[in-house]
Image (tube, rainbow, N blue to C red):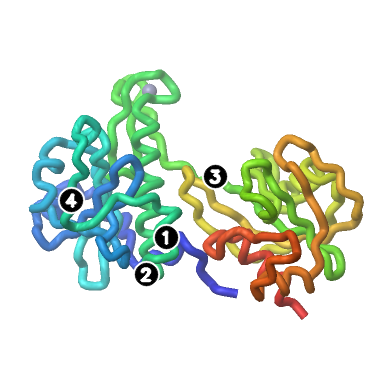
Amino acid sequence: MSDVHTFAGGPLDRASHLRTNSEWLSTQLADPASRIVPLWKQQPLVTRRRDGIGWLSPVDLADYLSSGVPTIFLGNDNDGIAHFAIDITVFEEANKSEPFIQVGRFMDLRSIALQLPLGDPSTLGTAKAILDWNARHGFCAVCGNKTEMRDAGYMRKCSDDTCNAEHFPRTDPVVIMLAVRGDQCLVGRQAMFPQHMYSCLAGFVEPGENIEEAVRREIMEEAGIKVGDVSYHSTQPWPWPSSLMIGCFAEAESEEITIDGLELEEARWVSRSVLRDVLNGATDQGVLLPPPMAIGFQLIKAFAEMD
Ligand SMILES: [Zn+2]
């Protein structure tokens, strides 16, 4: 298995101790050597050749920076160069022409991720998740007053000085799991999936539950299958909007499927040999798998490759 899934393994040092150093941040945001990626409607700027992040300099973005739109610190590279992301959605809402067209295009991160160098999807996923969280949390969940961005985007503070509540970016744990029984595994499809596509079952971890309990509950709820042992495989950050996918294998103790009809349209057992054929390009098995950047694909592939 690969150690690091798409959207993990970013190359920048997050240098979180610098997020509260406003003097240092201002200096970096005025330094032409610093790198800033603009996001427009959550879509990052990608180079014209689609081979990397469309980094710009503070000089290119002077108008945007002075307008005060949300700008977050992403971290430093190996040479100590500071990297930022800026949300230009509001600024450009009224402007029909796409900005920075000479540099690149604003692209949906999911559709471009696999074409980017390793690590870039993680950097852009962080940028998207943090900017999106800031955009959605303009008001205090405690008292309803406005919040203000702090810590270079990693905290929002209530502006009401009797409240002063601090709010932090969310990461929502999601279990995604493959129930296995002998050489069969359980896959399901949602109505929104492309025809014949199947993947692992998945669901949010609920308060008061550990990962194993969430895995057992979700498989029982969605497919009516009883599960015993649960083992951890790997995790993947998934910035839509802010999930952490926790990939597991689960030992099924029953076989009869009863789908809930809500989350799943269909669930079925598929054998390891069928999966091996599909992974080798067979199209006559009536099974399509999710794209390789999804942890669901990686779990199914890992099962198929087990002896
Ligand atoms: Zn408040």
Using the numbered discs, state the Cα–Cα distance from disc 3 to disc 2 in whole angstroms: 26 Å
Using the numbered discs, state the Cα–Cα distance from disc 4 to disc 1 in whole angstroms: 20 Å
At 54% across and 59% down in the image, what residue appears?
A: 236
Image quadrant containing the C terminus: bottom right
Task: Mark 4 or mark 2: name the one nearer the start of the chain.
Answer: 4
Q: Quick one: 2 or 171, which is closer to the camera? A: 2
> Which amino acid is tagged 2?
Pro
Task: Mark 3 or mark 2: name the one nearer the start of the chain.
Answer: 2
User: Of the residues tagged 4 and 2, which is closer to the observer?
Assistant: 4
Mark 4 lies on residue: 100
Binning the other alpha carbons within 10 Å of mark 2 as few (below 14), some (14 to 19) or many (20 upward) gives few
Where in the figure is residue 249, as x and y percent of width and height? 73, 62
> Which amino acid is tagged 3?
Asp
> Which amino acid is tagged 1?
Ala
Q: Are marks 3 and 1 in contact (CB under 8 Å)?
A: no
Image quarter where ligand 1 lies:
top left
Corner quadrant of residue 253 = bottom right
Image: 236 above or below 69? below
Q: Quick one: 212 or 4, which is closer to the camera? A: 4
Binning the other alpha carbons within 10 Å of mark 3 as few (below 14), some (14 to 19) or many (20 upward) gives some
Task: Mark 4 or mark 3: name the one nearer the start of the chain.
Answer: 4
Instruction: State the SS at label 2.
Output: loop
Mark 3 lies on residue: 172
- 31 left or right, relative to 278: left
Mark 1 lies on residue: 113
Label for residue 117?
Answer: 2
Using the numbered discs, state the Cα–Cα distance from disc 1 to disc 2 in whole angstroms: 8 Å
- 265 left or right, relative to 74: right
Q: Are marks 1 and 2 in contact (CB under 8 Å)?
A: no
Q: Are marks 4 and 2 in contact (CB under 8 Å)?
A: no
Q: Are marks 3 and 2 in contact (CB under 8 Å)?
A: no
User: Of the residues tagged 3 and 2, which is closer to the observer?
Assistant: 2
